[in-house]
Image (cartoon, coloured by chain):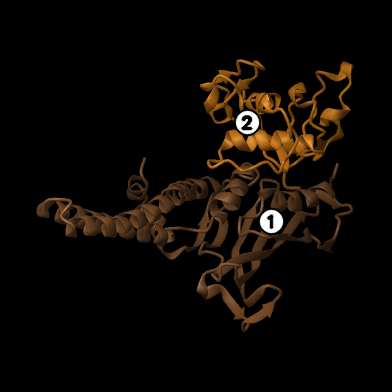
Amino acid sequence: MSVSEVYKSLNEEQRRLLADKHAKLSQPVDDLIAFLKPIAACDKLGDKTRSKFGCGSAVAFLLVIPFAIMWGNGAFPSWLGMILVAAAVITGIMLVRRWSWLNKIDVSNNLRGLVLPVLQLFREDFDRTQPVQLDLDLRPPTDPAKQKSKTDAYASGAYYKIIDTFYVDPWMTGEAMLTDGTRLRWSISDSIRERAKTKKNARGKHKTKTRYAKKTSIDVEVALKAKQYELGEVADAEVIPGEKKNVVRVTRRLKSDTLDPVHPAAFIDLVAGVYRGARPVK
Amino acid sequence: MNCMARRGFLTLNDCGNPGSTVCATCARPMCPEHLSPSSGFANCLDCGARAQQEEGTEGETDTEQAIPEDVDAEWAYGYRHRYYGSGYAPIYAGSQNDRYYDNYDTRSFDSSVNDSSFDETEDDAGGGADFGDS
């Protein structure tokens, strides 16, 4: 299926999420997965075809030059030269429009890389009769709206101009009731440093490289029923004992040098770590 | 007979749905939800997960393997199988004495149904786990 076909198969609400890239969802887990999966499928196809359209449009516009020269030199009959130049221009414009549309409906890879895997893994743990609350911000992590600060240009080593831009991306919060009566809350936030470094190479050309550093903070709160679980030792946890529920808060911070989503294992391990420390009351 | 699959990841529960098909590998009754689509619904998701692990040549218990493009129940059961193999002992809140899951180190609300505590003479031991809202 093409991206257009997948996009056309989406309902109004799914298309809105692709356009706005932000949604507050409250649905039982099966409905949530059914809602998000087609969006992820559309995004996956979009990612695969976007670069083809981008390269295709560049090639089409580049072809205009030799066609125009050959047309001017009389290498083609006048009518053929005009058709070839016009065809290259029209193809280029169409491909650029397509590429631009694909950019507009592109959402963060966190949806495919973390949200859906976690929902699928915990699907049978979530209480099917209760809604899972999800607040998702699927704009790119370096969206201008997420920019917090930017340094003035400075020099270091071979690089005569370095500019650091910092972004904060609190892209997901969620809450769900589990089948054992446990309440699970979580939030995930990325802090990103984008470093654009420019240097002059041996040939005198100015080259700019962009490097990323990402810190991800995963905060999880697990409220276990006091009558069902006794709390043992949970590493690096804040425990708030209660009459009905014992609340355990755990945090994990991860560093990465790419903008790729963190592996769902980071989230799974945090929640499972709390259950490891919980003793079922006999 | 009811589906013998155990649902869940953090805690395990009996599926409880009516079993409509018998798994071609383990011969346990299964409901449609717990049959593996890639086997043509002939095998259960658990047997599919075990087969996946046997086919893998390395990283058999690696829970940080790359996430496939399309995650589904088959992937989730495969991941669960690897995760349990990496040392996580889920809490079993059901009441079926199914030796199929003996290789999982499970914990229970009632020690009489803790899989790891079964001995050879207690195959038919009953005991319902008390997991209701008490």
> How far apart are labels 1 and 2 at the CA level?
23 Å
Whether labels 1 and 2 belong to a single chain: the reply is no
Q: Quadrant of the N terminus of chain B?
A: top right
The amino acid type, in three-letter code, at marker 1 is: Arg
Name the spot of residue B72 as percent of width and height, x first.
56, 38
Picture quadrant where residue B26 is located: top right
**Residue bearing the label numbered 1:** A183
Q: Is residue A67 visible?
A: yes
Residue A137 screen position, x and y as percent: 53, 64
Let me know if residue A127 appears in the view. no
Give the camera-side residue of A148 and A150.
A150
> Badge 1, how many Cα within 10 Å: few under 14, some, many 20+?
some
User: Which one is in front, A267 or A153?
Assistant: A153
**Residue found at the very far bottom of the displayed protein:** A152
* Mark 1 secondary-structure assignment: strand
Residue A39 shown left or right of residue B100 in the figure: left
Q: Is residue A214 left or right of residue B37?
A: right
Chain letter, colour brown? A
Image point (35%, 52%), residue name: A56
Q: Which chain is orange?
A: B
